[in-house]
Amino acid sequence: MSDSQTDSNRRRFLKGTGAAAVSLGLAGCSQGGDSTPTDEPTPTEEQTPTDSNVDESDITTGGNFRVGMSQAPAGLNVLNTNSAYSSVILNQVFEYGTATDPVTTSVRPNVFSEWEFEELDETGENDQPNVLVRINVQDGLTFNDGSELSVSDVVFSYNYVMEQEPGAFVSYIDPITEVVESDGDWDVEMTLAQPLGTYDSTQLGNIPILAEKEWSDVSDYQQYQPRPGNEGELLGLGPGVVTRYEPDTTIEISYAEREGDYTLSSLDWREDVNGLINGGPFVDAIRIFVYGSQSALNQAFLNGELDTMYEGISPSSRIPDVEEAEGLSLVDGYDTGYSHYSFNLRNAPLDDITFRQMLGFAYDEVYAVDRLAQGYAQAGDFVMPPGYKQVRPDGADDVEVLNSPAAEVFSFRQSGPGVVDVEGVRSFLTEGQAVTGESGTFVGQDYPGSMSDVSASQTESKYDYSFGPVESDILADAETEQEIRVDGQTLTELRGGDPLVFYINPADNAPQAAQMMENFINQLQQIGIPVQREVNTFNTMLTRVYVEEDFDLFPMGWVNLSPFAVSTLYGLFHSSQADDHSEGNSETSLNNPMGYGLFEDAGADDLIEEARSEMDADTRNQLAREAVEKIYLDFPTMVTTYNVTKWPVNSANWGGFVGNIPGPGSTYLGWQFQQVHQAE
């Protein structure tokens, strides 16, 4: 997720759960596959972004950089497409007020040269103070037809989006009450109804700057279909002009045919960022080729027909083919999200922290990472990926990310290799323990206590757990002679005759995910938990989970999370993003199907809200770390893996790629386009 999650853009950020998929997709379900180990190092926080010592004056310019995609883009209306494949194109046409640089994840000037905020005396949303944001616009910017940008274009863009309310932009514009031309020393004034700590990356950085002359006569943004090559259409401040658009086969973005100078890649701040080169783009054009299948795309790249692939090569079993090929390389990067199993806190006994935490002890992450993913994944812990160290609980300490003992408290408990510690896990349940943030020993493993001094929402078990003879049919063939009792009842009796049901995608689509789920269910059945699986297609699961909230556990994933955390935390874990079923089951599709935050004994609303409204970045990051760790302890979701991202490129012909950043070939592909240049 970027800084928003709405009904219309959810699919863009959901991913499936193929355990070994590398650089998983932004759109739809990703596929798993067999893997082969690699000697390539896994990126860690000790690695730094690729350093570029290239002087732009020494770069050989020109050439066409060829990119392959597995799916066709879904239109070129920047306000009405949620396709990540369309975004690859549109991000070269349109610009935004601010930019987040891919190396430091700092908010940088872009169309806006400077800005400041002031909290006002009058109150806005929830009796919080209004915030006045003053903005200056860069001088001398031109649209790609050569016409000059005016302050009027900027004000028009915001007011048009506020009036039209495109679904993907609703969360950005909701806090904005007014955008007007300033009559003082600044160019633009924006009023927010409340303090928002990430206003500079969200409200300033997520609304595309439109050409008023193109959009002023468009009464309904949904009906507008801009046509490349038509005069006065598809105008943007970006470096590119779409000169060919055959979405099922070929798209060309020309930099050479742009009218007017493109100066945003030469802003002063770029000189201070390790790895970025000023002055691009250095190629004449980006040529995008669409293939009918991933296998055809892979082969085209390996045959030298392409210079790179959007996202990466998949399945990961093909990565060694890249490593062994002459002239091809892999650019290391970080995941921008995570894969997860998430639980419905409305359903007993998943409404109890002790039972949810127990599930972590039964998940064999060693099997998932070493056996299934073969090293192309990292064991998960927090809902912020390793590349976002500044908002992870272990990011504030002098410890190696992913290796803090405080982040291992829910790791697999085994009595032997791959064998769950049945007696230890049962004791955790029957003794009514819960990991609350206090130090202790849990199922034989020491826990040093919370890193950010937070506590779990629930401090003791909600139910009395015991074990007795097997009665449920689902456990008849399981390797267990004991079955759990919850307040004296079998779990199936407690639930009106139903065992726990865990959703899974068809094995043909994600074989490793299916294999991991089978392993997980088997471990739970050995403990004496009646669990069965139910196969659902990705689309069916979306409806069952996000619309109907009809599930116990579902596997899925997120990509493109916000590096500033708070917008993601609000969108995925705040109670306002959950259906409370107070008036029946709403048909509204919200991003917190777990119901986390709806109940007094499981929620981080206060921390999320405080972080969201905090204007000081350091304080905001600390609050975000606390919220992330509280979610970890409350365990409404179990982060299973992070992907080890490897982006394949033709390094014999091209250079300038920035590595060891989040999403080098997906989230930040647009930055790579402005960096890439002919190899010497």
Image (cartoon, rainbow, N blue to C red):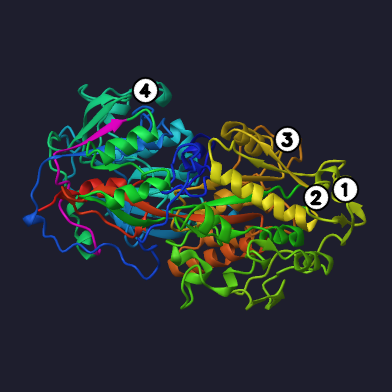
| Distance CA(mark 2)–CA(mark 1) | 8 Å
Amino acid type of the residue tagged 2 in the rendering: Ala
Residue receiving disc 4:
224
Decide: few, some or many residues near mark 4? Use Cα within 10 Å; few <14, some 14-19, many ≥20: some
Q: Where is residue 183 in the image (x, y as percent from the top left)?
A: 30, 48
* Residue 289 higher or lower than 141, as above or below: above
Asked if the stretch drawn in magenta spans residue 283, the answer is yes
The quarter of the displayed image where residue 254 is located: top left
Q: How far apart are marks 1 and 4 (CA)?
A: 54 Å
Instruction: Say whether residue 315 is visible.
Output: yes
Q: Would residue 504 be found to the left or right of residue 347 on screen?
A: left
Of the two numbered discs 4 and 2 in the rendering, the one whose residue sits closer to the viewer: 2
* Residue 474 on image: x %, y %: 81, 44
User: Which residue is drawn at the image coordinates 17% and 55% (left, top)?
Assistant: 278
Q: What element carries label 1?
A: helix
Label 2 residue SS: loop
Q: Nearer the viewer, residue 415 or 464?
A: 415
Indicate whether residue 306 is drawn in magenta.
Answer: no
The residue where tag 2 is placed is: 348
Which of 93/13 is in front? 13
Q: Nearer the viewer, residue 106 or 419?
A: 419
Q: Mark 1 points at which residue?
A: 494
For the residues labelled 2 and 1, say whether their Cβ atoms are less than 8 Å apart: yes
Labels 3 and 4: the sequence-earlier one: 4
| Amino acid at pointer 3 | Asn
Q: Which amino acid does label 1 sit on?
A: Leu
Q: Name the residue under label 3.
A: 585
> Magenta part of the protein: which range?
273-290
